[in-house]
């Protein structure tokens, strides 16, 4: 047998073994592992070395990814925190779960009303946390983003939950350490961590921050140092709780960040790649651990069904996401015929809501922007989305096809009636909202 044939045979054996191991995972587990979901707010995938970034912003995440499944094309359901995270919790798109108005939109209308009214996750929707709690998990959560709180329904199912107000990863780790004994004695436990450090305003962290003369490059440098700082704190809590053993760990982001890529800054105003392409890394327990890179595009809505499938639990019919266990077990370079959506809805005083949508196939991405303009990008040749083909002869059918798929899904999919909550924020909260860019 030739050396090439031997190598190919070895790869085939590995794939079969990996696939068999992961398929076995989907049987109901008698001794289920701990489950940890870590969301790093505002973390765009292409600012991590594992996604090709030239700066060493995340050495620990890079190390972890070398033993994990890395999804190269994972996309968020929206470009700001509340709808995007609600989609992770529910495996539903924003126009299904109804969390489309939060502190970002409501804060802008503070002058018109004494109270802020925001959407919340409907109580009748079973969240990831509730699913695991009913399975016997003790549930813990910490959030450093004020959107992820009880008022908006994010604490449903948590036995213990602590909300901070942009206090840094150190504060979150400190709370987790206080719970350390309870967490370790919980067999099994679910822990949700929502780090917020890369969110604007970007705090420089020496020695990783290097001052730049160009204001935009200086922002990027501070942003990168925030990622490096969070990476260090992530490593710290990983080692403190011993996640290298009997733990399924999932790392992702709610959305990314714009640095002038398409003329904008921040997030929550568009659906370009830089704000919806997010990291997604799954680190399995030792017996099932496998390293591979998956090329097929996936959604953050897939996190909940993947966990459900891994534990051998019954799938909810309403979920829009899909389990990725079978995809992990097959050829990681394979493509899918699936179309993935993102959604953004903003309020404008005295005017109808503005809505942006995107529909992504493996090759093409259609965007309807907030201003009503349309764009079409060839993702195979133009992943950075620099040249729109919308309106060009021969490409109108592609754009129309993607838009029609979205509209058809939106019409037929299950939707929940929007639920709201109101509160009158204190001056301290208003100052915090201003610092985060939620109140202008």
Image (cartoon, rainbow, N blue to C red):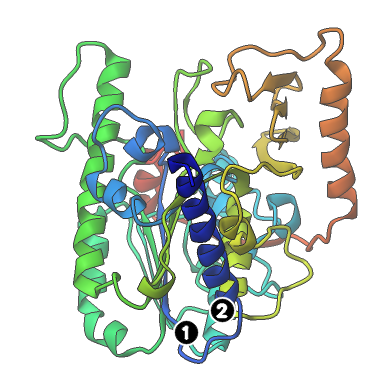
Residue depicted at 28% across the width and 15% down the height: 215
Give the left or right position of residue 405, taking residue 107 as reference: right
Q: Position of residue 176 (x, y in %)?
A: 26, 72
Residue 78 location (% of width, % of height): 60, 43
Q: Which residue is more in the foreground, 207 or 266? A: 207
Q: Is residue 400 visible?
A: yes
In terms of sequence position, does the residue under pointer 1 or pointer 2 come before the other?
A: 1
Image-quadrant location for residue 285: bottom left
Query: So how many labels did they put on this image?
Result: 2
Crowdedness near tag 2: few (<14), some (14–19) or many (≥20) residues, C-alpha within 10 Å = many
Residue extending furthest toward the front: 1
Q: Residues within 10 Å of mark 1 (few under 14, many from 20)?
A: many
Residue with the most extreme top position:
393
Of the pair 430 and 113, the residue shown nearer to us: 430
The answer to whether residue 86 is visible is no
Q: Are marks 1 and 2 in contact (CB under 8 Å)?
A: yes
User: Residue 375 falls in which quadrant of the image?
Assistant: top right
Q: Is residue 209 left or right of residue 259?
A: left
- Image location of residue 27, percent across then percent down: 61, 82
| Front residue of this view, candidates 344 and 379 | 379
Residue located beneath label 1 in the image = 32
Q: Nearer the viewer, residue 298 or 148?
A: 298
Please indicate whether residue 416 sits to the left or right of residue 401 in the image: left
Identify which residue is drawn at 22% across, 36% down: 225
Q: Secondary structure at mark 2?
A: helix
**Residue in the image at 41% along x and 36% along y:** 51
Up the image or down, 6 lies above or below 246; here it is: above
In this image, 301 relative to 56: left or right? right
* Residue 384 sits above or below residue 391 on the image: below
- At x 62%, y 72%, the residue is 309
The residue singled out by tag 2 in the image is 311
Answer with the quarter of the image where residue 118 lies.
bottom right
């Amino acid at each position: 047998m030739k050396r090439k044939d031997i190598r190919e045979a070895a790869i085939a054996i590995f794939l079969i073994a990996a696939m068999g191991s992961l398929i076995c995972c989907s049987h109901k587990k008698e001794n289920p592992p701990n489950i940890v979901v870590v969301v790093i707010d505002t973390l765009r995938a292409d600012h991590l070395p594992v996604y090709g970034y030239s700066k060493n912003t995340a050495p620990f995440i890079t190390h972890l990814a070398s033993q994990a499944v890395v999804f190269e094309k994972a996309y968020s359901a929206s470009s700001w925190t509340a709808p995007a995270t609600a989609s992770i919790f529910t495996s539903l798109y924003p126009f299904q779960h109804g969390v489309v108005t939060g502190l970002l939109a409501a804060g802008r209308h503070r002058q018109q009303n004494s109270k802020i009214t925001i959407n919340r996750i409907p109580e009748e929707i079973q969240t990831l946390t509730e699913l695991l709690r009913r399975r016997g998990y003790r549930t813990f959560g910490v959030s450093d983003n004020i959107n992820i709180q009880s008022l908006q329904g994010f604490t449903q199912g948590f036995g213990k939950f602590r909300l901070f107000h942009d206090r840094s990863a150190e504060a979150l780790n400190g709370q987790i350490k206080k719970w350390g004994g309870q967490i370790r004695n919980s067999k099994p436990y679910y822990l949700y961590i929502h780090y917020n450090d890369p969110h604007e305003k970007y705090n420089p962290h020496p020695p990783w921050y290097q001052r730049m003369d160009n204001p935009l490059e200086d922002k990027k440098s501070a942003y990168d140092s925030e990622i490096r700082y969070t990476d260090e704190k992530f490593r710290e809590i990983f080692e403190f709780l011993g996640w290298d053993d009997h733990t399924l760990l999932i790392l992702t982001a709610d959305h990314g960040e714009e640095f002038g890529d398409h003329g904008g800054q921040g997030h929550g105003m568009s659906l370009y790649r830089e704000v919806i392409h997010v990291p997604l890394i799954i680190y399995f327990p030792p017996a099932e651990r496998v390293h591979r890179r998956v090329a097929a595009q996936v959604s953050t809505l897939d996190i909940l069904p993947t966990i459900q499938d891994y534990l051998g639990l019954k799938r909810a019919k309403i979920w829009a996401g899909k389990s990725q266990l079978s995809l992990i077990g097959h050829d990681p370079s394979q493509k899918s015929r699936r179309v993935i959506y993102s959604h953004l809805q903003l309020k404008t005083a005295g005017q109808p809501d503005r809505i942006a949508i995107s529909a992504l196939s493996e090759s093409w991405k259609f965007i309807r922007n907030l201003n009503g303009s349309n764009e079409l990008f060839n993702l195979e040749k133009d992943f950075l989305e620099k040249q729109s083909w919308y309106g060009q002869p021969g490409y109108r059918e592609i754009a129309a096809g993607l838009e029609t798929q979205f509209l058809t899904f939106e019409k037929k999919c299950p939707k929940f009636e929007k639920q709201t909550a109101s509160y009158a924020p204190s001056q301290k909260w208003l100052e915090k909202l201003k610092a985060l860019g939620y109140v202008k």
